[in-house]
Each structure stands twice: as C-alpha cells, then as structure tokens.
Image (cartoon, helix red, strand yellow):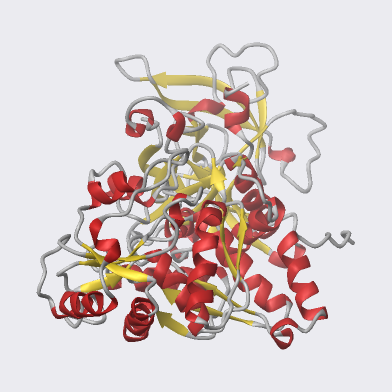
Amino acid sequence: MSEERSLNFIEQIIEDDIANGVNDGRVLTRFPPEPNGYLHIGHAKSIVLNFGLAQKYNGKTNLRFDDTNPVTEDTEYVDSIKEDIHWLGFEWDKELYASDYFDQMYEFAVQLIKKGLAYVEDATSEQIAASKGTPTTPGTPTPARSRSVEENLDLFERMRKGEFKDGEKTLRAKVDLNSPNMHMRDPIMYRIKHAHHHRTGDKWCIYPMYDFAHGQSDSIENITHSVCTLEFIPHRPLYDWFIKELEIFPSHQYEFARLNLNYTVMSKRKLKQLVAENYVNGWDDPRMPTISGLRRRGYTAASIRALCERIGVQKRDNMIDVGLLEFCIREELNRTANRVMAVLDPVKLVITNYPEGQVEEMTAENNPEDPSAGSRTLHFSNTLYIEREDFMEEPPKKFFRLGPGLHVRLKNAYIIKGESVEKDADGNITTIYATYLPESKSGGDHSGLTVKGTIHWVSAAHAATAEVRVYDRLFKSENPNAEEGDFKDFINPDSLQVIKEAYVEPGLLQAKPGDRFQFMRKGYFTVDPDSTSEKVVFNRTVTLKDAWAKVNK
C-alpha cells in the first residue's frame, strides 16, 4: 500500500478556505483554453489539476473557451479540445465561452470609463509601448489620457459601431504609469478587429484583451480558485485591480509551474509551424506532444494522468525528462498489453528436418503479468520468418542467438540449430537453414539441452503483412528552444521509419485502432486509424527499455 502523499500548495489553500468558510466552502475551478490550436501535454497538467481539485473537494469545473481573438480561432479546435478532455477522463460542469460575456464586458468597460478609469487611445501600438517607459523609468501619459469621460464614452461607442479601422483606436485602463509592474501601466482593454467570429459572427468589431476578459469571466462565473501557470504572476495585480474597481465577485488567481518536456517544443506557434510546413503529418502526428498525437501513438489517458501525478504541483519551473512519460506508459502496458510476435526485418528460416506441409498448434500465454488474459494458438511450420539481426554468419562470443552450429529456442516452440545460408547475388542472406530437436518442445522439453537465447518468429504460411511506423523523438536536441538558430534545424531526421512489410501473427488482423500490444523483444505498439481490413498499421509507442539513456551517456 502506497503512502498517502502530502498536500500540494494549492490543495492546502483550498483546505484552509474550506475550513474558514471562504465562499461557503464551495470549490469551482475552470479550464480556459484559447481555441487556436490543439491541446498538448502541458495543457494536460492544467486539466488534471483543475478537474482533479474539483473532484477531490466535491466541486465543479467549467470549460470556458477564451475566444477573444477571432483571427486565430476555429470550431475545429473547439471540438478537438472537448474530445481531449473527455479522453483524459474528465467531464466539465458548464461549457462556456468568453464570447458569452461580450455584452457584459462591454458594460464593464463603460463602467470603468464613467469612473474615469479607462480612456480611448489614438496612439499606435509602437507609440503606446514607447510611452510606457521601462521597468526602471516611469511611463509618460499620451494626450488621450486626459480626455473627458463624455468624449471617451462617445469614442468607445463609435469603436463598437465600426467607425474606425483596425488599430486606429484602443481602449486603455487608467491605472499607474509609474508602477514597477509594466502590466499596470495603462494596459489595453479593447482593440479593433474587423473579423468574423466563430460564434458571434459580425456582431462585434471590438474584442477584449486577455487581461480584461479573463478575470471578469472568472468573476461572472463565481470561480473560487483560478489556477494558471507561473507566467501570469505579473498579471495578477491587474486581475485584482479590475475586480476591485468593478466591485464584482472576488475570484482569485493562483499560479503553478507549467509542464516543460525535453526533446520537444510546447509553443502553439512552433507546433503550428511544424504542421503548416509539413515537418509532421498534422496535429495528431504521433511525434507531436499534442494530446491527440500522444493518443494516436498509443499513450493512454492513465499514463498521462500518472505523469502529472508524479511531477506534482510546484511553484518553480523545471524541465521534465520525457523518459518519465515513457516510464509511465511502459509501466502500464507491461501490466495490460498482450504479448504478440511480430518480425519487423524478416529473413526466411527453413527447418529442414521438420515435415514439409505439417502444421502444429502451439499454445502461447497472452500476458505473463495477467493470468486472466488467457492464451492463444500459434501455427508452427517448417518455414518461418525471424528477425535478420537474430542470425549472424560469424557470431562473436556471447552471441546467444542463431548462427552456424549455434542453438537457440524459438519462443513457445522448439530448440533449433543453425546449419547454412543461401544468399543473393549481392551477398545478402535470403534464407537460413536450420534443424530442430523434436524432443525440445516448450512445456515438455526432454532434450536435456540448455540454451541461453530465445527468439521470436512467425509462420511464413500463416503470417499477416503489416505496416509498422517506428517513431522516435522529434528533436535530437534536449532543449530545442534554447538552441541558437531555427528550432527546426534540430529535428531528428530518424524520428520516423516506415516498415512497409513486417510480418505479424494472423490474429492481429482483427485488432482495432487503439488496441495496444507488446511486440516481443521490440517494444509497445498500437493500431493506427489508417488501418484497413486488408492491412493493419502499427505505431510504435515506446521501446521496451530507454534506448536514449544509453545513447546520451
């Protein structure tokens, strides 16, 4: 029985709030993605945290799409986000959109204008940035800062009606141009964008900025614990300022460390580049860190939740080794995946003293870790396929596989001895010839011979052909974000190897997309959605052991 883990700092805050009757002990969190791309494993940590907190404390979680930028957002992303959250095992209480509150936010902005706390700005974004000063020098007011309330109300109404071009006007909060926090130096609340919105159509041509929309949306929904990542710490004073000045429900923001994974990139902008420039085959390419990519590669929701649980909730950013994610899926699949035999680089093996035309049925255990998984029948004949690397014509010492005069066991079958080979004109081995010991059958071996090696095989007459996609890490650099130059220069050229004709047990033709298996001695593989009734396609999820740890020592 595992020891109960200690509370993380957010759980401690919530328990203190409940004990003190804050918000009447109610817990309501939210997950607020912007629908401008597919979710990645970094978002998974936020999903697991927000939904997990609500589950632990009998609360609820809202799914709220931060759809305040019509230029980059699409319903395709909305649908994919919902699918990913469901797949991870969570259900939201309400499906909401920041655009649900556009009318209310507009009224909030008017309220701040009337209080003399917001004004319409004429300056360009470059001029605004220059007027803000630097962290060590105060900002300087633009002429627009002294506009009257009446003039600001009129101009803001005209902005809403579409009288101005994109970028011609903005609405800024009047906060503090001397603040050491640059976010407090009269931030932009609204900008003009004459763009069609995926939900509100052409009703609006002004859209709230994140800093104005986010806290107000939290407040409208009565969110008790607004949990976000560390980069939003400097935004918290502004979050609190808007809520205080509007005198609305006091939602509060708490920050935790985001999930950073080595050998990959997490920036949506960079992920979009990889997709748009065809470095990968779409958002769900199994090399991508997107949840849909991980799912297609064969990762389970449980393995991703296990990773999030293992790394915990911290207040300081750090880099997580992708090997830990691989460990989580290996640990799960070792328990749950049925073992099967698949030959990825086949060479023909003919057993010369086994009767030609005879077919024998061998019994094989599906999963030694799970007795309830049962067994299956394998067909054995005199002509098999084995892995090319399992035979050496001139084997070195301690080579415990097949070679001339060497004995090896065929898994669930017989001991064989290598005899001779046949080669093509280029000197490549095309056929290996061997003999078998009839009395050495697995489960009833009376040969008296002990062999150190066991290899897998499939019967040539019964094997099914499969395509196998062998995926590896997308980047060869541990931290492509930190490298000089273009991050795409560090893409691993060997991140995908496609094997068009591998041979697998015939029962795998009935496997369905998403089914997972351990290919004995080769790794864990899952059935890809590209599979058809004629040809099954497998994706390698992960190797049996961490091969990169050895390479990078």
Q: Quadrant of the C terminus?
A: top right
- Looking at the image, the residue that sits furthest to the bottom is 24
Observer-nearest of 410 and 134: 134
Q: Position of residue 123 (x, y in %)?
A: 20, 55
* Residue 206 falls in image quadrant: bottom left
State left or right for residue 514 relative to residue 116: right
* Residue 48 falls in image quadrant: bottom right
* Residue 497 falls in image quadrant: top left
Rendered residue at 38%/19% (across/down): 428
State left or right for residue 217 relative to residue 367: left
Q: Quadrant of the N terminus?
A: bottom right
Q: Position of residue 164 (x, y in %)?
A: 11, 69
Look at the image and tell me whether residue 290 can be seen: no
Look at the image and tell me whether residue 273 can be seen: yes
Rendered residue at 52%/56% (across/down): 232
Observer-nearest of 324 and 181: 181
Rendered residue at 42%/82% (across/down): 96
- Classify 149 as above or below 514: below
- Classify 8 as above or below 196: above
